[in-house]
């Protein structure tokens, strides 16, 4: 079978969790390939809302195995907590259901402390990271001094490496940032225990995924964060430290340049972002409150990982076109269409204007968007509540028009539209 990849086309929080949950029914494996517990994937099944940061959303299906790939940075504390949370919800979590790549890197409290110290040192130029230690963990990986999952297999060596890691981090914390050092003596026994508990889950996950695919089984690769947070091609430096792109699914899962069957781009019907960085279609005031929600519902626009209110705005078709191209998206799922009901006008940014010129595409990627002003197309809104709609024909004509314009503007077909957080609140686009 060819690999299926699911990516976010915006700044994360597009609703990938619910889309992965929907598409992974019957899949043998769902595998995360980038990032760590900076992600927050929300899946609602009946009365239960799962908020997953590390485990693939597909694991909510009891027959599906979860894989954490070599492209990830894994905080063992979060991982063990999340495994327990699934167990408490009646799902089995054992090495038959979950595997952890030997080559993934570990996140420790030293990485989190460094993340926070570095953010504080940036002052006004803060990136607004999630504070989960993601940047420092990938820094250690690139500097070839990181702790890998594989290191946990030899406890004696692990204890030496762990101590060296904390000592090195303390040097930076104290000397560079004037922060408190970490207590290695207190942390070591804790981490030795995590290592013992996680050892049975360590595997060559690239080999595992390869054999599943060659054996005709379905494997889904679940991207975390979103295209515009990509370290190379996103809104640098306001990005994360890994690649959420579809192309990273291959390297991040330890696969070769194998066939990819589909790349599903998850696109929220409007734009959101957490943290700092450019946002040409951002809105404020009443419109923003309306799109964001009050925070009373789990799917309102407040960070799953940090609880921060998300910045909100109109759909940006220029950035979406770019995301579709650099991921090779073959089909889209539009999420949260129900939230747009009641707005008199739906705006989509179709081009940028700068220096009297119109740009339909970004001349030099999205890192510097400051010269650009959004050029909007206004579409008629609709009043009807969409949450009960289950067929394409039953959507208001204006909503169908909005979806068709997204297809035309972005250049990729739409396959599904979600109209609420529940599993069945999905409409298949049939014409
Ligand atoms: P970091 O990944 O914690 O280093 O944060 C870097 C930037 O990416 C910040 O703007 C975060 O808010 C953003 N970010 C990281 N992970 C996510 C996510 O899963 N959803 C949305 N934004 C994210």
Image (cartoon, rainbow, N blue to C red):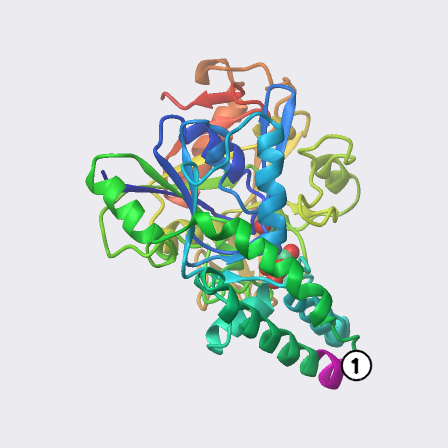
Q: Residue at x 43, y 62 (%)?
A: 150
Q: Magenta segment, which residues?
A: 173-177
Q: Determine the secondary structure under disc 1.
A: loop
Q: Is residue 149 left or right of residue 122?
A: left
Residue of label 1: 178
Give the position of the N terminus as an image quadrant: top left
Q: Is residue 174 magenta?
A: yes
Q: Nearer the viewer, residue 358 or 183?
A: 183
Q: Nearer the viewer, residue 61 or 100?
A: 100
Give the position of the C terminus as an image quadrant: top left
Quick check: can you spot residue 280? no
Q: Is residue 19 left or right of residue 80?
A: left
Q: Is residue 315 magenta?
A: no
* Residue farthest front in this picture: 156
Q: Position of residue 61 (x, y in %)?
A: 46, 27
Q: Quadrant of residue 173?
A: bottom right
Q: Does 35 sit above or below residue 125? A: above
The quarter of the image that holds ligand 1 is: bottom right
């Amino acid at each position: 079978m060819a690999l299926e990849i699911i990516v976010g086309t915006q700044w994360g929080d597009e609703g990938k969790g619910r889309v992965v949950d929907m598409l992974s029914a019957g899949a043998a494996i769902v595998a995360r390939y980038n990032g760590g517990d900076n992600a927050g994937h929300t899946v609602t099944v009946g009365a239960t809302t799962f908020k997953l940061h590390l485990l693939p959303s597909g694991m909510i299906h009891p027959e599906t195995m979860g894989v954490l790939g070599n492209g990830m940075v894994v905080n063992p504390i979060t991982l063990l907590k999340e495994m327990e949370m699934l167990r408490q919800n009646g799902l089995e979590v054992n090495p038959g259901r979950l595997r952890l790549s030997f080559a993934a890197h570990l996140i420790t409290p030293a990485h989190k402390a460094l993340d926070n110290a570095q953010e504080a040192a940036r002052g006004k130029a803060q990136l607004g990271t999630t504070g989960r230690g993601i940047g420092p963990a990938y820094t250690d990986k690139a500097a070839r001094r990181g702790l890998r999952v594989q290191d946990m297999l030899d406890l004696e060596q692990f204890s030496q490496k762990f101590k060296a890691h904390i000592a090195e981090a303390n040097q930076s914390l104290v000397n560079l940032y004037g922060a408190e050092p970490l207590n290695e003596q207190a942390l070591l026994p804790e981490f030795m225990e995590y290592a013992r508990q996680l050892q049975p889950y360590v595997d060559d996950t690239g080999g595992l995924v390869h054999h599943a695919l060659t054996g005709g089984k379905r494997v889904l690769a679940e991207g975390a964060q979103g295209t515009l947070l990509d370290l190379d091609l996103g809104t640098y430096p306001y990005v994360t430290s890994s690649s959420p792109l579809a192309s990273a699914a291959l390297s991040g899962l330890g696969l070769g340049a194998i066939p990819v069957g589909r790349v599903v781009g998850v696109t929220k019907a409007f734009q959101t972002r957490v943290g700092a960085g450019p946002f040409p279609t951002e809105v404020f005031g009443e419109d923003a409150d309306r799109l964001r929600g009050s925070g009373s519902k789990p799917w309102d626009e407040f960070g799953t990982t940090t609880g921060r209110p998300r910045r909100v705005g109109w759909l940006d078709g220029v950035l979406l076109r770019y995301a579709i191209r650099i991921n090779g998206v073959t089909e889209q799922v539009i999420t949260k269409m129900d939230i747009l009901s009641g707005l008199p006008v739906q705006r989509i940014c179709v081009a940028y204007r700068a220096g009297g010129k119109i740009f339909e595409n970004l001349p030099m990627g999205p890192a510097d968007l400051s010269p650009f002003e959004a050029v909007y197309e206004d579409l008629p809104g609709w009043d009807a509540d969409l949450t009960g709609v289950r067929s394409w024909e039953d959507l208001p004509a204006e909503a169908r028009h909005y979806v068709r314009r997204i297809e035309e503007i972005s250049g990729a077909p739409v396959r599904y539209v979600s109209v609420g957080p529940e599993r069945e609140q999905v409409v298949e686009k049939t014409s």
